[in-house]
Image (tube, helix red, strand yellow):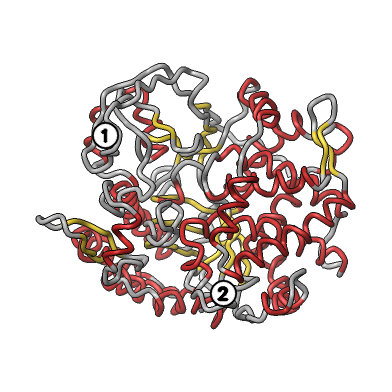
Amino acid sequence: MRRQLAGIILILGILSATSCKNKENQDPNTTDKPEIVYTDDSLKTYAKVKLTTDISQLNEREKAMLILFIKAAEIMDELFWYEAYGDKNELIAKTPEELRNYAEINYGPWDRLDNNRPFLKGFGPKPLGANFYPVDMTREEFEKANLKNGKSLYTLVRRDENGKLYTIFYHEYFKKQISKATELLRRAATYAENPELKNYLLLRAKALETDDYYDSDVAWMDMKTSRIDFVVGPIETYEDELFGYKASHSAYVLVKDTEWSKKLERFVNYLPELQKNLPVPDQYKIESPGTESDLNAYDVIYYAGDCNAGGKTIAINLPNDEKVQLEKGTRRLQLKNAMNAKFENIMMPITNILIDESQRQWVSFDAFFTNVMFHEIAHGLGIKNTINGKGTVREALKEQQSHLEEGKADILGLYMVLEMLDKKELQGIREEYMVTFLAGILRSIRFGGSAHGTANMICFNYFEENGAFSRTEKGTYIVNFDKMEESIKGLSELILTLQGNGDYEGVVKLTKEKGIITPELQKDLDKLKSAKIPDDIIFDQGIKILGL
């Protein structure tokens, strides 16, 4: 599927620097702040696309709700700025005008697609705990304090006047903003004609006020028939690289693509069978995924907060609550318009440079869409609780959990695609999905040290070591299909075993050895930079763009 997107703008970083200091986010162990000066070629590039959809299918009540959703999403954006950095206004005021947009893309002075390197003078490394914890707090101090609710997804850790650590729930710390957001959700509920949507909005408002999200997550799982959707609240834990405990605020405003959604419904029925057939010993797949999952396609019309920072999310698999997943499953939402924007503006240009000419014909949007879809399905498979009493996989693997989970979803997703091809439930041939998968890896490894970038590097290096692909003399990559199938099974078993054993040290070792970009690969990625291929996309979005 090829569709030219209007309004493409490449945003280039330009030579600039300033002295910016934020006392909450400065590393107290760094006495000499580095003189960071970035040139035009040093900063990442983004293709700007208009984020819209056909809203003529919606009635006036639904359109009114979209406006309220976007306003609530703007509040989530404000909260994420604080969680990621601190005082946005203070930073933007001190940032040279020509770099302010770049700071807004990254929600701070650190380049998210370049391993969080600072791009402004006066800043050291980004604190691993972002702004969820005191910047001078060590891991040992946190563990020793044994704080009540310290590992909660929904608390900030702060110091009192005596320097002692304490926790405070989001709904208390952000009381003013949460009050505004919940008022908007309740107003939106008064317009809702769909009872499932109405129930969800009311329960989500209550959840934001209490930081107890179980009931609203269940209500969201039960929301099957609404033409619009609003994913809102503290959701993913990627931003907390210290422990992986704290969830960041995000929001997506969505309009359902009913035609594409109908194509996807049948795949959910295969979840129990897919779990049973995973290439791993039985003890690592004893859990049964919930069977109330659904799989749908949406156009996303507004991003805010965590999902809008740096590389943009193109699919959603929620809720993250392991209890809800085991009881009900998850909903997988494919963000079709954003996905297409990345395919057209980034993935196809990469294909034309780095994929061997003999295999380029096998890279397609349909295969890309399907690979991403099964990536999200794969999040619900495997194991959520360790087999040896170490608690949940999330608790056992701490900050290593996010990228290993993304790696699991990548590799199990492709494994399931091949299973579906064998069952004749998918159209196409294995070559198409495998070559498109490799092109997708070459796209995502440009995300630096993010969870998705690290996961793709582990997969890339594992595949290369096992002969799943090779690099030609021309500097292009060609897939060995039989060896790739073997590698898919081998890496699947490795990751699922690490998760089931809660093997923290094993994941650290795997990441250290394989979560890296080799000099040879970097030279190839530099070709993409020279060709001015965007690293990711940003959006022209909002109420006016939609014509509301």
Question: From what the image shows, is residue 368 above or below residue 334?
Answer: above
The quadrant in which residue 500 appears is: bottom right
Q: With 220 as the anchor, is 473 left or right in this view?
A: right
Q: Quadrant of the N terminus?
A: top right
Residue tagged by mark 1?
91
Residue 56: percent from left, percent from top: 52, 56
Residue 108: percent from left, percent from top: 35, 38
Q: With 514 as the anchor, is 490 left or right in this view?
A: right
Question: From what the image shows, is residue 31 above or below residue 63?
Answer: above
Kindly check if marks 1 and 2 are in contact, taking CB atoms under 8 A apart as contact. Answer: no
Residue 429: percent from left, percent from top: 88, 54
- The 10 Å Cα crowd at callout 1, few under 14, some 14 to 19, many 20 or more, is many
Question: From what the image shows, is residue 43 above or below residue 307?
Answer: above
Q: Nearer the viewer, residue 199 or 544?
A: 199
Q: Which of 419 and 387 is in front in this view?
A: 387
Residue 358 visible, this angle: yes
Question: In the image, what residue occupies the spot 38% across and 74% down?
Answer: 213
**Spatial separation of the CA atoms under disc 1 and disc 2:** 42 Å
Amino acid type of the residue that numbered disc 2 sits on in the rendered structure: Thr
Residue 373: percent from left, percent from top: 66, 59
- Which residue is situated farthest in the left direction here? 161
Q: Mark 2 or mark 1, which is nearer the start of the sequence? A: 1
As drawn, the label of residue 386 is 2
The quadrant in which residue 380 appears is: bottom right
Amino acid type of the residue that numbered disc 1 sits on in the rendered structure: Leu
The quadrant in which residue 265 appears is: bottom right
The nearer-to-camera label among 1 and 2 is: 2
Residue 302 visible, this angle: no
Question: From what the image shows, is residue 459 above or below residue 256?
Answer: above
The residue tagged with tag 1: helix, strand or loop? helix
